[in-house]
Amino acid sequence: MNQFAALKTDYVRKKLASTGIFNHIVYLETTTSTSDVARALPCIQDKHGTLIVAEEQTAGRGRKKNRWFSPKGKGLYFTLVLNPPEMSNVQLITLAAGVALTEAMENTCGLATKLKWPNDVYVRDRKLAGILTEAISRGKKLLAILVGIGINVNHEKGDLAEEIRNVSTSLKIAANKTVSREELLLNVLKSLDLAYRKLLRGSSGEILKCWLEKAAYLGERVVVTNENTSIEGEFIGLSNEGALLLRDYNNNVHEIWAADVIRCRKL
C-alpha cells in the first residue's frame, strides 16, 4: 500500500474558524470526484461555504469532460459550494478563482504564474492547475455554484500521467521545493473569499483588472476552437462579463464565451 501524508484538515479548520469562511470541511481519502460529492449534497442551496476535499480522485475531470489526474496525497483536489444571488455570472466566478489561485501560489511559495483563459493556471508554459465552475439549478432557479479546483502540488515528474508529462508541471517541480498543502489551501480559500466578496459588492472590474495583469497571451495571436469552427486573432482583453475579446485579421472584434470553447492556444 502506498503511504502518504494526509492533509491536516483539523489544522485547516482551526485556522479557518477565526475567519468564518469555508469552515465546513468534508474530507475524503478517495472519491470519484469532489464535484460529484458536492452535487449530491442534500439542500445544496443552504450549503454555502462547504468544502469537499479528497486525497485522490478516480474520475476527476476538467472542462469538456477532460480527465484530471489526481494521484493520492500529491495535490489539492477540492470543490467549494457557493450560494450566490440569482443571476450570478459563472464566468466571473471562474476568473475570480483564477486570480485567487495565482495570489495563493505566490504567497505560499513565491512562484509567479499566468492565467490562461478561461480556467487554467500555467507556469513556464506548463499547466499547473485547473478550475471547473458549474451552476446547479432547479428549473430557472439557481441553487448553487460549484467551484472545482485541481492543483498539482507535490508531484514528481513520474507522478504526472505520461500523456500530460510534457505539458504539465507541479509547484514542487517549478519551485524546486516541497510545498505545504495546508498553507496553500488556506491561502487559496482566503484569496477566493476576498475575490468573491468583491463580486458580490459589484466590483467585478477589480477582478478583471487583476486577471488581465496575470493573463497569458494578452496582446498576442491566438486561435480559439469550438465544436464547429476556429477563429484566429489578437487577444485584446475581456468584456465586462468575462468573455474573451478577439480581434480578427479583418479588424472585427469577437466576444467569445467559455462555454462554447474547446481550446484556446497561442499561434
Image (cartoon, rainbow, N blue to C red):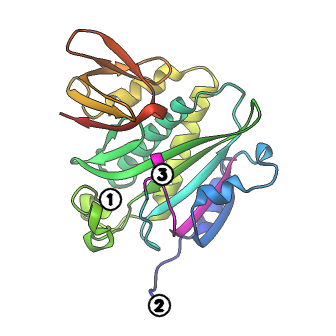
Give the distance between the C-alpha atoms of the residues marked 2 and 1, in whole angstroms: 25 Å
Query: Which is nearer the eye, 205 or 125?
Result: 125
> Residue 201 location in percent, x, y?
63, 22
Q: Which residue is mark 1?
A: 171
Query: Is the residue marked by circle 2 packed among few (<14), some (14-19), or many (20+) residues within 10 Å?
Result: few
Q: Amino acid at mark 1?
A: Leu
Q: Amino acid at mark 2?
A: Met
Give the distance between the C-alpha atoms of the residues marked 1 and 3, in whole angstroms: 24 Å
Depth check, mark 1 against mark 3: the one in front is 3
Residue in the picture at 66% in, 47% down: 81
> Is residue 15 visible in this depiction of the protein?
no
Q: Quadrant of residue 230?
A: top left
> Residue 51 location in percent, x, y?
64, 55
Are the residues flagged by discs 1 and 3 in contact, CB closer than 8 Å?
A: no
Q: Which residue is mark 2?
A: 1
Residue in the picture at 59% in, 42% down: 134
Q: How many marks?
A: 3
Query: Which is nearer the eye, 6 or 70?
Result: 70
Q: Which residue is mark 3?
A: 65
Residue at disc 1, secondary structure:
helix
- Residue interval drawn in magenta: 49-66
Tell which circle, 1 or 3, labels the residue nearer the N-terminal end: 3
Tell which circle, 2 or 1, labels the residue nearer the N-terminal end: 2
Query: Which is nearer the eye, 239 or 249?
Result: 249
In the figure, is residue 54 to the left or right of 125? right
Query: Is the residue marked by circle 1 packed among few (<14), some (14-19), or many (20+) residues within 10 Å?
Result: many
120 magenta-colored: no
Residue in the picture at 39% in, 54% down: 108
Give the distance between the C-alpha atoms of the residues marked 2 and 3, in whole angstroms: 30 Å
The residue sitting at the front extreme is 228
Tell which circle, 2 or 3, labels the residue nearer the N-terminal end: 2
Q: Quadrant of residue 196?
A: top right
